[in-house]
Image (tube, rainbow, N blue to C red):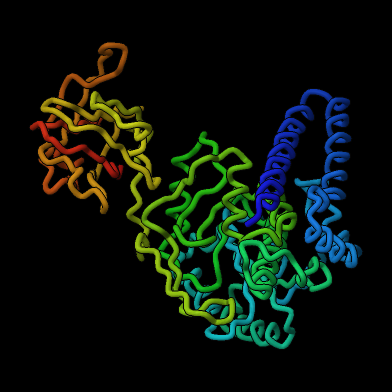
Amino acid sequence: MTASFLRRECLKFHQMKHIFEILDKMRCLRKRSTVSFLGVLVVFLLFMNLYIEDSYVLEGDKQLIRETSTHQLNSERYVHTFKDLSNFSGAINVTYRYLASTPLQRKRFLTIGLSSVKRKKGNYLLETIKSIFEQSSYEELKEISVVVHLADFNSSWREAMVQDITQKFAHHIIAGRLIVIHAPEEYYPILDGLKRNYNDPEDRVRFRSKQNVDYAFLLNFCANTSDYYVMLEDDVRCSKNFLTAIKKVITSLEGTYWVTLEFSKLGYIGKLYHSHDLPRLAHFLLMFYQEMPCDWLLTHFRGLLAQKNVIRFKPSLFQHMGYYSSYKGTENKLKDDDFEEESSDIPDNPPASLYTNMNVFENYEASKAYSNVDEYFWGKPPSTGDVFVIVFENPTVIKKIKVNTGTEDRQNDILHHGVVDVGENLILFKQSRQCDTYIRLGEFKNGNFEMSDVNQKIPFDIQCMRIYVTKTQKEWLIIRSISIWTS
């Protein structure tokens, strides 16, 4: 990888970040002044025009000039695809072919997007669609729509797949829950002779570049079909009642800024977005379609919209089930070991403030133990009498409590001697709220604590929960997760 390549890629993403910052300012300016909004819009359009015209001649490298020449030979198709880049919030001008559908009668809560092409080995699309519908309750089915983009240019394969889909899922198509579309080849940018970034072979570059465009056109179509959108691959198995689990997570994050929520740790499986972000994401994938694989671009998109950290939830709601990749039919036996078939056990974790007098290591603060995100609290060796306290915003009826300490790679950083207490009667103590009365629930065993039917054992609505260290230990302490289920 050359230094000129790295400089050019870095410059591109800094320019993109600047573009998104301008977009956000435009959104605010529009509320204040039409004149100032139009002024910023003109500047933005001029900037975009310069960016599109000059992006391929930023370096004097001869190879890049040759590649630019190749693009210019196909300028009509290039402009046809990218002509709407100056409006990141608008739809891309694509006329889709509806292969199987009925008119969408109303906007749903969640759209599940799948893109599929012909594979050399195996075909998992039908099983994936089946899993989506079978793992959803009747009430959940009312709130989802599934959009399948048959993105292969082979019309015979598409016709065969449409026939199979309509035979197996006719009632879902009639109910408006399943839509099958195709974006014609004429709307695609050039796919041959692209830059071979990362020393990928030419056919690999073509495959992943087309895949980026496949997803861009799918996202573009789904922008107005629901409030939220989740991206899946076409070889995925779903956990039961995954929609209910997703809704619970979204509710728990109300008032929190996020761009992407992840419900699987594999590739671009289970990535959740606000539907209002889909047009920008579609444009982004198109702009950088030949630069890198889709999952890498999704990471950059998240960062550009100021979500620095991954927000991933466990257990995972989606599992990769294919054995052969859609690229050349190569073996792909990746599995998500955080996947659980039953997803209904996701905790509620009601709003609360957290406090500890333990010595916190770096930025592994107390709050990270209380979220469903894949993070944890990490403190230096605790002493007798040290506490980790959760104060609930409102008195809470708790059914179940589960606390796990330590991790797979740090199995000794557990709480060796400790108990869990619950309390009532909030008082103000040293500028913080604390309970003045506690009842002991039980002890940690092998670093873990779990108790069900708490509401049947405790005669009051709980206002505080406390982890209390009963003996000094020499090992550091990781509190991996605190999970609370309410009635």
For the image, the number of numbered tags is: 0
Residue 190, placed above or below residue 292: below
The one of 235 and 127 positioned closer to us in this rendering:
235
Q: Position of residue 29 (x, y in %)?
A: 77, 27
Position of the C terminus, as image quadrant, is top left
Residue 270, placed above or below residue 14: below
Q: Is residue 64 left or right of residue 342?
A: right
Q: Is residue 276 visible?
A: no
- Residue occupying the point 12% across, 30% down: 439
Position of the N terminus, as image quadrant, is bottom right
- Residue occupying the point 72% across, 76% down: 99
Identify the image quadrant of residue 334.
bottom left
Q: Is residue 160 left or right of residue 340?
A: right
Q: Position of residue 395 (x, y in %)?
A: 30, 29
Q: Position of residue 26 (x, y in %)?
A: 77, 32
Q: Position of residue 277 (x, y in %)?
A: 66, 47
